[in-house]
Image (cartoon, helix red, strand yellow):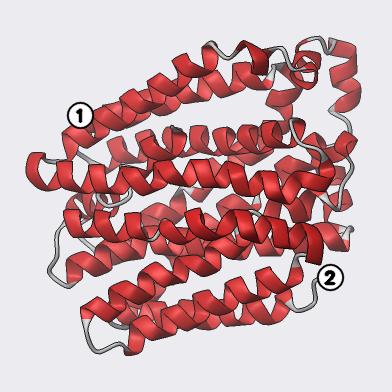
Amino acid sequence: MYGLGSSMLLPIFPNFVKEIVKNDTYVGYFYSSMAIALLLAGLLSSWLFKRFSRIVVLGGVFVLCAFSVMFFVFANNLYHIFFLEFARIFAAMIIIISLALLVRDFTASKNLAKTEGVYFLFNNIGWFIGPIIGGIIARYFGYEPVFALSGMVFLASFFYLAHQDLVKKHPSLMSNKKTSVSENKTTDGLSLVKRFKKFFSNKGLVGAYLVYLGYLTFLSFKSVTLPLFISDQGYGSDLSGLIISLSILPYILVEIPIGKYADKKGLRTPIVCGFAIMSICFFGVKIAPWFIIDALFLILANTGSAFIEPLYDVYFFKNTSKKEEEELYGIFSTADPLGKFLGPLIFSISVMFLPIDWAFFIAGALFFVAGVFALRIKS
C-alpha cells in the first residue's frame, strides 16, 4: 500500500514542481534539497526506535505522509510545496527504515535475501499499479484528485496496520516499548560521532553503503528525469505513467530469483551486473534514434536496479550483528539522502549546459564506475 500511494505521484510530481519553478534545472535543485529531510529522518530513526515501538512510529509517519500529500491540493507556491514535500519525504524515509527492520525481525538470517525479494515483489506490485492510475487521472482530471487519492491510500495503510495484532505482539517490537529511561541513556549507546566512526571503520559496511548509494542515485535520477524527458518529447502524464509502471516489471520478475541466487552464490555477481545494465541502458537512451527505443531502454535500465534492490539490505545485515542493527541502520540509511541529493543534482548540472538526453549519458558513465567498484565485493 505504501508503494501504491507513493507511486501515484511519480508521473506528475516533477511537472507539478516545474509549473511553479518554471525551469528543469530548478526542479532538480528542488529534489536535491529534499535530501535534508532524508538525512534528518535517517539520523533521528535510531532515537525514535529506542523510545517508541516500531508500530507506533510507523503509524505516526503514515498519518503524516497522508496529510502532507492531501494538502498539495491547496499548494500554490514554492514555500507550500517545499514544506509539504519536506514532511512527506521525512515520513517516507521513516516508513522505509521501519519496514526494512520489520522484514529482518520476521526472517531467519539464512533466508534473508529470499525474503527481501518477496517483500520487494509485493511492494513493487503497488509501484506498478500506482503510476498508471496517477498518470491517467492527472491527464483527464488534473493533479488534485491524484493527491487526494494518494493521501487516502496512506490513511488506509495506517488503519490496516492498526489491526495487525500479530505484528504488534511480536517480541522484538514489544521490547522497544518497555525500554527504561536509564536504558535509553545507556543505549543512546554510542554517540552519533562514535556510531559514524564504528560504521565507516567496517569495510563491509562501507561497501554496503556505497552499493546502496549507487542504487538510490539511480532511483532519484530516474524519478526526476524520466517524466521531464517524456514531457520534453511532447508526450503527456498518461504515457509517463505507463512507462514508469512498465519499469516496475523487471523488479517483479527478477527480485525473487536474484535473492535465491545471492543466498547460494553471493552478492558480487548480481550487483556488478546490475550497475552494468544501468550504464548500458542509459548510454542507449543517448544514442537511440527514436523515442520508442528510448522508452525501451528506460524500462530495461530498471532490470539493473532490480538486481540490486533485494541485496543492499542483505549486504548491510551480513556485516553487522542483530544487536547493532538498530544503532547502525540509521547511519546506513544516510545513503538515502545523499543518493537522493546526487541523482537530481546530476540532472540539474547536466541540463544547465547540455540537452536533456546528455544527462542519461553522464549518469551512465557514473554507473559504469560503480560497477567497476562492485567487482571488489567479496563473494
292 horizontally vs 221: left or right: left
Residue 131, image x, y percentages: 30, 48
**Is residue 125 placed above or below 103 in the rendered structure?**
below
Residue 262, image x, y percentages: 74, 61
Q: Which residue is mark 1?
A: 74
34 horizontally vs 244: left or right: right
Distance CA(mark 2)–CA(mark 1)? 52 Å
Q: Amino acid at mark 2?
A: Ser
What's the residue at 50%, 41% (across, down)? 123
What's the residue at 67%, 22% (across, down)? 54
Q: Secondary structure at mark 2?
A: loop
Q: For the residues labelled 2 and 1, say whether their Cβ atoms are less than 8 Å apart.
A: no
In the image, which disc is placed on residue 60?
Answer: none
Q: Does residue 348 show up?
A: no
Residue 48, image x, y percentages: 68, 24
**Is residue 57 placed above or below 321 in the rendered structure?**
above
Residue 25, image x, y percentages: 31, 66
110 horizontally vs 36: left or right: right
Nearer the N terminus, badge 2 or badge 1? Answer: 1
111 horizontally vs 224: left or right: right
**Is residue 157 placed above or below 101 in the rendered structure?**
above
Q: Amino acid at mark 1?
A: Phe
Q: Quadrant of residue 26?
A: bottom left
Viewer-closest of 81 and 108: 108
Q: Secondary structure at mark 1?
A: helix
What's the residue at 44%, 40% (across, down)? 3
Viewer-closest of 369 and 191: 369
The quarter of the image holding the N terminus is: top left
Q: Which residue is mark 2?
A: 379
What's the residue at 77%, 52% (across, down)? 316
The quarter of the image holding the C terminus is: bottom right
